[in-house]
Amino acid sequence: MVDTDSYQIVAYCCEHCAYGAADLAGGLRLQYPPEVKIVLIPCTGKIDTLMVLHAFEAGIDGVMVAGCLPGDCHYLEGNENANRRIERIKNLLEQIGLEPERVNMYNLSSAMAGEFTVIVEETTNKIISIGKNPLLEERLR
């Protein structure tokens, strides 16, 4: 049996849409895995490559970036810029020996609480199947 309590996943959620979906999920008392910790950001366009890489360096096992639906970004193209950045981060992860599947971008509206919980569940299951972040194990040695 896998000890899921030891897994850590960060969900960077934009304040206008994805965070609203997460908040609505809480208000509706929808359950999602406790491994996911939500971080409120103004826009997914604020996601920086170093921010994500530092999360992995600190031992985070997976990163979710959740923003507005395509074409509905409150900052016009922030979510599109974030999506391109996430693809570059995936390439960097592969180059340093981490699975690119450890980071993913999702698009939600603030009314998509059910979808938010499904995405969190799928992400958690994916990260558990990949395994713990080997960077943390190397640091602890």
Image (tube, helix red, strand yellow):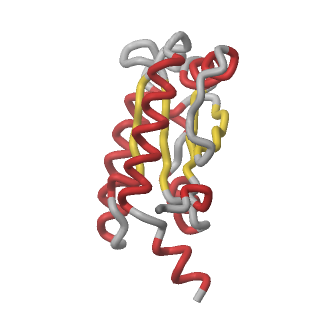
Q: Nearer the viewer, residue 76 or 129?
A: 129
The answer to whether 2 is drawn above or below residue 13 in the figure is below
The answer to whether 83 is drawn above or below residue 63 in the figure is above
- Residue at image location 42% in from the left, 53% down from the top: 127
Q: Nearer the viewer, residue 2 or 117?
A: 2
- Residue at image location 50% in from the left, 74% down from the top: 135
Residue 82 placement, left or right of 48: left
Residue 62 image point, x, y percent: 48, 53
Q: Nearer the viewer, residue 32 or 9?
A: 32
Residue 102 image point, x, y percent: 40, 54
The answer to whether 68 is drawn above or below residue 140 in the figure is above
In which quadrant of the rendered view does residue 54 lie? Answer: bottom right
Tally the numbered discs: 0
The answer to whether 5 is drawn above or below residue 124 in the figure is below
- Residue at image location 43% in from the left, 43% down from the top: 123
Residue 92 image point, x, y percent: 35, 62
Q: Residue furthest right?
A: 27
In which quadrant of the rendered view does residue 42 lie? Answer: top right
Q: Residue furthest front?
A: 1
- Indicate the quadrant containing the C terminus: top left, top right, bottom left or bottom right: bottom right
- Residue at image location 64% in from the left, 43% down from the top: 37
